Structures are given as C-alpha cells and as structure tokens.
Image: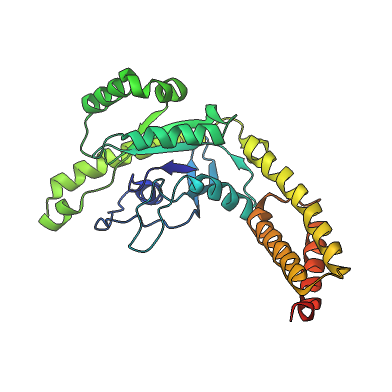
Amino acid sequence: MFLGRTRAGKSTVFEVLKDATYIPKAKSIFSETEDARLFSFTVELSDSQSGTQTNFNINIIDTPGLFEQKREGEHIRENEALKKSILKCMEYEITKIHQIFFVCSFSEGIHPQDISAFREFIELFSGVEEKVAMIITRSEGLDQQDKDQTIEELTSHKELKEISKLIGNKIFFSGATRKEFLNKGSVKALKQDLYHVSSMRVTLYNCIFNASEPFHLTNLDYYKQEQLHAQELQKEVSAYQEKLQDFQGTKQECGDLRNELKKKLKQYESLKGYIDAQMGPDFAAVVTKAHKTIDETKDKVK
C-alpha cells in the first residue's frame, strides 16, 4: 500500500516498478489519483543456479493524496483517504497487507503535513507499525553520498524522530528517467539515469519480496469499530422499519420517520465494506425490507 501527501510521486513509483524505463508525464498542479486504485501485475524471478522460476503477483493500492488541493468548486480531500483505502482493499477482497510505504518527495522535502499525515496513519493503522517503510521519490539524481546524507538528516531531525524510530533502516529511494535527457538526445545521461533507477527498483523489490507474514486488515482497531457500527446500524434500520410499517400518526410525523430511515440506509451504503460474509445476507434482507416499507408508505405523507 502506498500512502503519502499529494504529488509525492506514489503513482510514478508504481509505474517504475512495472517498467524501469517509464518516463513520467508532465506535472499537473493537481493530483492525478482521485480515488484509491488497485494495480496488479506479475513479476517473474529466475534462479540461475537451480533454473527455477518464481512468479510473484503484486497488488498495489495507490491511495489519493492526503491534504489534497482539488480544482475550483471541489472540496479538499483530508485524511478520509486512509479510510477509503481500507474500503478499497475490502472491495477487492484484499485483507492482507505485506508492506506499507509512506511516500515523500526528495525535491519537495518533508513538510509538516507529511508528519501530520504519518501520525494520522499510525493512529488509524494501529498494530501494523512493523510493516511501515519509507520511499523517497525523485531521487534519480542522487548518488550514494547524497542518499546517506538524506537518511542522516531524517534520523537526526527532532520533528522526524517519531517516524525514523518506527521505520528504522527501512528507508528506500525511487526515481524515474528524466524526460529532458530524452528530449535532448543525451544518451549517456539517459543510461546513467536508467542505471540508478534500476538499482533503486531492485532494492525496493527485495524489500517487497522479503516481507514477513502479512498483517490482516480485519485486525485493525478502526475496522473492528466500523464492524460494531454496522451491527448497531442493522438494529436501528430494523427498528425504524417496523415502526414505520405500523405507523398511525400524522403525515408530518410519518414523513419525518421515513426521512430518518432513509438517512440510516445511506449510512448502510458507507459501511458496506465492513459488513462481513456472515452478517451480509441478514443485513441485505433488512435493507430490502426497509426500502419496500418506504415505498409502501409514500401515500401516507401526501
């Protein structure tokens, strides 16, 4: 799972993992990732000594940028992106996470918002801390000395001690071949870029392939809370439905009751991802019955 502030380069890291020669498009002042997205691809690894080949199926959740500035007239996306990412995993039946990468841009530095987003993430993903690593993007121009200096700054900065303590030595670098070298026909510079990008890509893949036992999203405290919320909501929907079905009051009172039941049904839509297989059919039956009762009582409010 990739998490990070808007324009940190999360989507580019994914593209480079797929293809080391990927060249990013021209920058937009707005984030390209509007909603959490799932990308899947297969990586083939061959062992030259044994002659065996192993296929790794990679599923990456690319999340919307945190603290998102969107186009005019649209709301700013806040850290609801984290919760949407959990729901996206549930939607694709991905319940196990092997690695979570907190992505920051070298060219833009680490902002106070990055630290704030990281804290929000740790609070929401309590229990998954050992799976957290950091990727510093736009690092194609850095040599090893530059990288070592960057790590030193990260681990010694007082505002970043919380992050560095948690991720330990799991700090990785990523970059992409620069388009200006292609436009200028600078073959030597292109080869050098590709060499650095490929080396960083291999290091990142080693982290992914060597990840230990996965973390189950269903163990998240937040996920468990939402499940309890869904269970309570089922009871409320059922109670409102029964009350409305036998209601004998005024048109105004009946209308108010119908509206309250509709609100509860909207909450159900937002909690679908947290309703497990055992609870699902019963809840679906309750919702169907509620919709039917709302339709049957529309004449009472005319």
Q: Residue furthest right?
A: 246
Q: Is residue 20 above or below residue 120?
A: below
Q: Quick check: 153 left or right of 48?
A: left
Residues 85 and 10: in front is 85
Q: Number of labelled discs? A: 0
- Residue 105: percent from left, percent from top: 30, 39
The answer to whether residue 203 is seen in the rendering is: no
The answer to whether residue 257 is seen in the rendering is: yes
Residues 15 and 20: in front is 15
Q: Quick check: 226 left or right of 82?
A: right
- Residue 251: percent from left, percent from top: 77, 74
Q: Quadrant of residue 28?
A: bottom left
Colour convention of the picture: rainbow
Quadrant that contains the C terminus: bottom right
Point 30% across, 51% down: residue:
21
Residues 196 and 104: in front is 104
Point 33% across, 19% down: residue:
158
Q: Quick check: 221 left or right of 252?
A: left
Residues 170 and 4: in front is 4
- Residue 89: percent from left, percent from top: 59, 49
Point 63% across, 56% down: residue:
270
Point 31% across, 17% down: residue:
156
